[in-house]
Amino acid sequence: MSVYDKLTALGITLPPVATPAAAYVPFARTGNLVFLSGHIARKDGKPWVGQLGGALGTDEGKQAARAIAIDLLGTLHAAVGDLNKVKRIVKLMSLVNSTPTFTEQHLVTNGASELMAEVFGIEKGAHARSAFGVAQIPFGACVEIELIAETE
C-alpha cells in the first residue's frame, strides 16, 4: 500500500506548505536528507495556544502533535514531490509549551511519532526523537515539531 493510500485510509488530506512567519525557509535539502523547519500546532487555521499542564492536558497535546505531523507531511511532500520516495523518518524534535511541573512531553510527542509509523510503517516511520518542555513557543502555540527525513 502506498503512503497516499494510507493517508486516504486515515482520512488525511495533505495541507499546503505554510508561509514562514520569519526569516527562514520551510525546508532545506542536503544530499538525501530533508530538514523541515519547526511547525507549530494549529487548530481551525489559528495557532493552537496554551500550556500543557495548565489549560491543556496530555491528550489534547497529543492531538496537537498529530495535527502538526499532518502539516509536516504536507511540507515533506512539497520538498520531495512524492512521499513514496521517503526512505526513512530520521528524527523528530518536539518543543512542548509546558508548566514547570508538567513531565509528559514524551507522551504529547507520541501524537506525531505514532502517525509517522502509521503512514510509513514501522521500518521507515520509526525515528530518533527528542521532546523538550519549554517556557513558551511563538504565538503561544502549545507544541512545535521539526523533522528530518532521508529520501531515495
Image (spheres, rainbow, N blue to C red):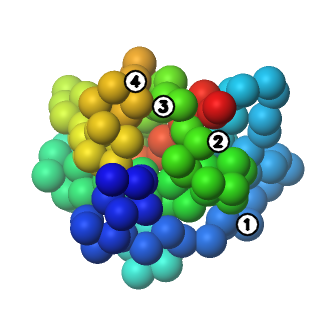
Circle 1 is placed at which residue position? 19
Distance from the alpha carbon under mark 1 to that under mark 4: 26 Å
Secondary element at image label 4: loop
Crowdedness near tag 3: few (<14), some (14–19) or many (≥20) residues, C-alpha within 10 Å: many
Compute the Cα span from label 3 to label 1.
23 Å
For residue 63, above or below residue 53: below
Q: What crowding class fits label 1: few (fewer than 14 Cα within 10 Å), some (14-19), or many (20 or more)?
A: few
Picture quarter containing residue 21? bottom right
Q: Return the residue at label 2.
A: 36
- In this orientation, which residue lies closer to the viewer: 32 or 62? 32
Circles 2 and 4: CB atoms closer than 8 Å: no
Mark 3 and mark 4 in contact (Cβ < 8 Å)?
yes
The tag on residue 127 is: 4
- Residue furthest out toward the right: 23
Between marks 2 and 4, how big is the CA–CA gap? 15 Å
Earlier along the polypeptide chain: callout 2 or callout 3? 2
| Count of numbered labels shown in the rendering | 4
